[in-house]
Amino acid sequence: MRRRILLAILLAVAVTGAALGIPLGVTGWVLVDNVTREDLASNAQRIAAILDDQLADGRPLDLDQVRVAVPRDGALTVYRPERPTLRHGGELGTEVVTETVPIAQNGTVELSIPAGPLRTRQTQVALAVLMLVVLSVGTGTVVATVTARKLARPLRHVADRAARLGGGDFRPDPRRYAVAELDMVADALDASATALAQLVQRERQLVGDVSHQLRSRLTALQLRLETLAEHPDADVAEGAEAAREQADLLAAVLDDLLAAARAASEVGAEPVELDRHLGEIADEWRPVLRPENRALRVKVDEGLVVRVTPARLREIVGVLLDNAVHHGEGTVSLTARRGEADGTVLVQVQDEGPGVGDELASHVFDRGFSGSGSTGVGLALARALAEADGGRLELSMKRPATFTLFLRVPTPSDVAAVAWPEERVPR
C-alpha cells in the first residue's frame, strides 16, 4: 500500500513537472532569443538614425560616431548601392545573430553578434528550468514519502487490529489517526469488538448453564432409575434398567457434544513460548504505566511452552494488566512458572494495591458486576476466553490482588507432524 501511494504521488508530481517544465523551458529559450534580437535591432535603429542625419547634412558616413552603439563583440556593416561597403568590427565566424535596418539613402545597416553567448544564455535558462523541475520532483518525493508513511502506518495498524479481532482479541484500541475515514473504521472495529466480546461471554455462559442443568437433571434421573431398577416387580425393574441405559447413553452424548464444542473453541490454540509472548505484551503495557510512575516487572521461567490461542492470551493478560492499572497501585508483577500439577503452567498478575474486598471477591468474574463503575465485562470475558482454550482463570489471592491463569502444557497429540521425544520408562 505504501509503495502504491508513493508511486501515485510521484507520478502526479512528475507529470505536473513535465507539463509545466517543458513549456517553461521552451518559453525561456525563445524569450532569451527575442530579448537579444530586440536589443540588437534597437542598436541597429540608433545607428541607422545617426547615419541618416549624416547623409541629410551632406557629410560622409563616419562609423566612429556610432561605435558606442555597436556591441563589444559585434560587427557593423553598412551597405549602399554603388558605394563601397563600410565595416566596423572583426570577423564573427559562421554562426551569428544579425539584425538589418534600412537607411534613408537607399541602403541598409547590418548589425551582427556571435551566436555563442546567446546559446549559452539559452542553455543556462533551460538548465535553470530543469533544476526547478528536479527540485519540484525532489520536494514531491519527500512529501510523497511522508504522506505514504502517514497513510500506510494507520492502514497497517487497522489491518493488524482486524486480524487480532478475528483471532479473538476483543480489547478496544484507543489509538486514532487524525484521518476521519480511518478513525471511523477504528470506531467500528471497537464497537464490533465490544459486541463480539459480549456475544462470546453470553455463549460461554449459556453453554455452561445448559451443560450444568442437563447434567444435574441426568444425574437425578439416573439415581431414580437405579432405585427403580431394584423394584420387586420384574417388568418395572426391566423398564427402569432400559431407561437407565438410555440415560447413560444420553450422558455420554452430552459429554461428546461438550468435548466437541471445547475442541471447536480451541481450534486456534497452538504451542506458545511464554517468554516471548509475555515480553511483547509487557512492552505494550509499560508505556501505559509509565505516566503514572508505575513499573511492570516480568519474570518468566525458562522453557515454558503452553497450548493457547495467542490472541486470547494477549486479551486475557491485557484484561488483567488493565485491571491492575485502574484498580491497583504500585509495581505490577507479571510472572509465569510451572504449576505443582503436571502439565500445568501458572501465569500470575499482581499489584501492590489494597486488593479485593471480601464482599467483591466472589463476584469479580460475574458479567456486569463492577465495584468501581466499569463495564464489568473484562474479567468475565477473560475467564470465558481462558476456558475456551482449556484453561481457567481464578482470583488466587485477595490482598494483594493476584489473578492466576492456569494453562495447559501441549502434548504430542496437540501438534501434528511433530516428532515428540518418547518418555523413557524403566524396563
Image (tube, helix red, strand yellow):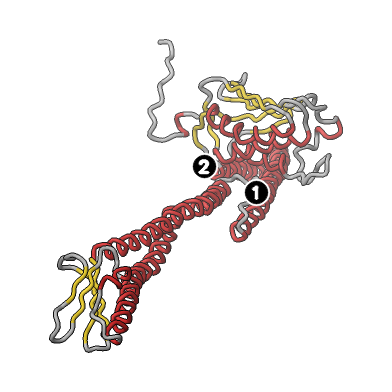
Residue 344 x %, y %: 59, 25
Which residue is identified by label 1? 200
Residue at 65 percent across and 56 percent down: it is: 187
Of all residues, the one furthest to the front in this rendering is 58
Residue at 18 percent across and 81 percent down: it is: 79
Tell me the quarter of the image containing the C terminus: top left
Residue 113 x %, y %: 25, 68
Mark closest to the chain's N terminus, 1 or 2: 1
**Mark 2 and mark 1 in contact (Cβ < 8 Å)?**
no
Residue at 35 percent across and 67 percent down: it is: 25
Secondary structure at numbered mark 2: loop
Residue 241, placed above or below residue 124: above
Which residue is identified by label 2? 268
Viewer-side residue, 241 vs 348 = 348
Residue 395 x %, y %: 74, 30
Of all residues, the one furthest to the top in this rendering is 427
Viewer-side residue, 424 vs 256 = 424
**Residue type, label 2:** Gly
Residue 314, placed above or below residue 128: above
